[in-house]
Image: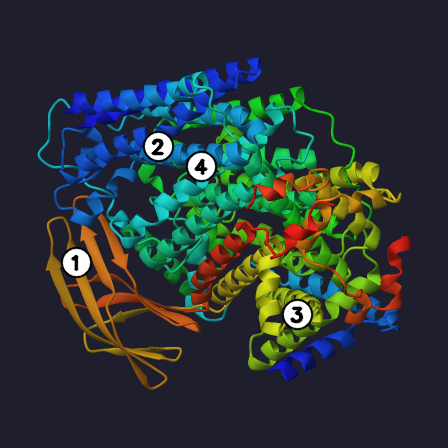
Amino acid sequence: MTELGYVALILTLLVAVYACVASVVGGVRGMSVVVDSAVYGLYTTPLLLLVAMVTLIYAFVTNDFSVRYVTENSDLSMPKMYTWVAFYAGNAGSMLYITFILALLVVSVLYYLRKNLPEISGYTATVLSIMLGFFVFVLLFYANPFEKLQVVPSDGQGINPLLVHLGMFFHPPMQMAGLISVVAPFSIVMGTVMAGKGGTDIWVEHGRTWGLISWVILTVGLMLGAWWAYTILGWGGYWAWDPVENSALMPWLVMTAFVHTVVIQRQRGMFRTWNLVLAIMAMALAQVGMFLNRGGPVPSVHSFAQSSMGWTFLLFMAITLFGSILILLLRSSKKEDNAGKLESLLSREAAFLFNNLLLLAIAFITLWGTIFPLIADLLNNETVSVGPPFYNRMNGPLILCLLVLMAIAPMLPWRRARLSQIWGMLRFPVALAVVVACVLVIVGVRLPLAVASFSIVSLVIGSVLQEWVRGVLVRHQRGESYGKAFIRLVLSNRSRYGGYIVHLGITLLAIGATGSSFYAMQEDFSLAPGETVEIGNYSIRYVSLQSEEFGNRLEEEALFDVTRGGYHIGDMKPVRAFYPGHNVGATKAAIWSTPLEDFYIVPSQFDENGRGVFRVHVFPLVWWMWASVPILVLGTLVAISPRTARREPGYESEMGN
Amino acid sequence: MTIFFITCLSIIVIGAVLYPVVRSRNDLREVASMDEGDHSIRMAVAGLSSAQLDLAIGNLDQKSYDELEEKYILESGAAGLKDSSYQHND
Amino acid sequence: MELCFQTIIMSLGRFQGVDSFKIVHKMLIYSVLVGCVLVLACTDSGTDAVNYEKRAIALDKSLMCPVCPGESLDQSQTQLAYQMKSVIRGKIKEGLSDREILNYFVERYGNSVLLEPQTEGVSLLVWVVPPVGVLFSLVVLVMVLRGKVGKGDNEDAMGQGLKEEPGVAVFLDEVGDRGWDPREFGQDEANSTRNEG
């Protein structure tokens, strides 16, 4: 069956090459039929890649060890469920998955553009077919998932044990989809530039829609990764500034900048070239991300997808980057005259500019810290590590400034603001922030950074609340009840209020991050069965230890009886599994989660008597980080949802003369 | 079995690529402009609605609002179309 | 419920339109700036705690496990990591300072064992380049903006003729009718007459 998959890949490459040539020839010669032919050809690629993916999955599910990739990434003792997703655990399989998602994006973007902005759809097809062609080319010639083994082994080598976890079903597919989704806004931008319309605003609304789609997929991917790290890696952290994590963060930062400045372009025609550059930058960073993921030049916890073909991605990134800039320069069209001007540094436009500056500064610092070990090695032959302390010190203040900006910017008027206006707008949010700071200090929360962070979060919440109330007021004056006004307000200004909802989601994220970063408790205990210890409000009794042997591992499960402040909570069962084949231990923490705090027990080693060393954490407010994700998704959906024009009865009589 | 599927896929691909050529020979024209018009009206409505809110709460001055209103009216194509584009939305 | 809403909204309204704001707002800006400076000054990536274990954990978090890719001693579960952790606790009891303990490990495993790069040699570059880069781009931004900052067009944009075209009325109706007066929402005279700006 895998031969079918391989042929499907070959067909895809042929289609991509044909589509590229046909769309260029058809575009240049004005033959729309030829362009259509290219597009329709591309419409078949999701089917082709689905077939390829299905044959690979089939090989995994049937334990077909004649396929090298299956042998390298599974074994007979792997639980059945995981055979369905193991295919994206390694390099070649994850490439196949990414290419499939890319094909889906190709079809969605082209279909969308042909309906909404047909004049660039041909050129966008060219860009998309080149992207698709590259990935399939790499699959066929550098990372063939269907390669056969001469001698069929009786069992496979098995997957990295850390991956046998629920998170495997969600984080990798979402994260990889996020990285490749940057192709959508990028191709729209490049299509516009190639069509000679780079100086116009025709693409903005669509670039914004696809930018937001890409952003939300990246966001969910990142949050799923944070959640997975929190539950599986045993040390309760959700973000370690690991090179692979950073490589997913950087495109996200640039996409955030992009979705903000396109709003300015839509309303005032400003930042035209800048937005084009941002889209190109996001694509380049996503490709750098793929390189770091697979090239392995910097050591990372994510080393499971190592290969030597990372340099191919670096080369592709360089070609894309320089090619795009070249096209930008060669096809620079005359800008439309109606561009707005930046009239004051105290205006919404300027605030969005600062937003971009901060986001890009964070992205640059993250990039610098990530590749610095390589640079130090090249310059001085010295091995240097750049860890969380660097990023916290450098990015921390910038993130705080960004939060402050998030509170102020949406309230600023367009063009020019008078100081008196700003004061008028800020009174309530600032008052709220000050009140919150005082309450915190009284209650005992004294760390300056934590107080600052919570106060700034209150600033944001205050300003969003204020804007909402003002908007409701406006509608109420038109005669709507408050309830109806609230709903109608959101529905008639979806991009703005969707944005506010997303900002509120970010504040929840900030609350979770602040609580767990500054007020976490951690203690190691050595306990024998029957012993009890106390930490914080909690009292835990180590009841017993159960060992169970499976085919490829030994699992030891400890049973704890947990009480908090006198109330019996129940049982918690942290597990430690040891895989002799890989010589690695994996722990599954027992987590008891409430909106106030998470109580977290991780086991390390046990001795013969059942005595073990346990690390116990209390993480305040972490729950809010995960709660923020549905809010972020909801806000994005509101912001992209299209508004259907209302049809009032009787309007026909108003038409005509 | 594999050969059968390979043939199927190839036929689908070739069919897709040739479909527009065949269709144009039969003189069918795609009517994309209606949808496009409806879409730009929706976009313009959204943008202008936002601007009205800004005007009401004081984030936008009247002159700027007027400019934006003109821009969105032109963008929506409402002017100069008389009743043609609206009729098609029935 | 409606009454509650109205009270909140009325009190918000009272916040706006105050005349003697200048002194208060200056004070606010200064105190915010001072506050920011204080907050940033308090940013510290590590403090010497009296509690030995807290110190030990802090040190665990600032050293990288040499054999695991990208994990700190605090995170790692390997044998070597456990050994190094007990060495750290031993040395704290002996009375060595944080710096001395870190140097001990650097001598054995090289600079790469430190998670926070040093401030000398090549590592200095990692600390210096970001602030310099950000400042540089700020300067470039200001220079580029200087050329662009200016007043917007002030001519009358709206020709009355446009509004009378058929189809436009229907379009405006889609958007929703306007008919409110901004001044009803507490905007003072100064705000509503800023159109001349």
Q: What residue sits right under mark 1 in the picture?
A: A555
Determine the chain carrying the residue at label 4. A
Q: Nearer the viewer, mark 3 or mark 1?
A: 3
Q: Secondary structure at mark 1?
A: strand
Q: Secondary structure at mark 3?
A: helix
Q: Residue at x 72, y 50 (%)?
A: C169
Q: Is the residue marked by circle 3 packed among few (<14), some (14-19), or many (20+) residues within 10 Å? A: some
Q: Are marks 4 and 1 on the same chain?
A: yes
Determine the chain carrying the residue at label 3. A
Residue A103: percent from left, percent from top: 39, 32
Residue A469: percent from left, percent from top: 66, 70
Q: Is the residue marked by circle 1 packed among few (<14), some (14-19), or many (20+) residues within 10 Å? A: some
Q: What residue sits right under mark 4 in the picture?
A: A108
Q: Nearer the viewer, mark 4 or mark 1?
A: 4
Q: Amino acid at mark 1?
A: Glu
Q: Amino acid at mark 4?
A: Ser
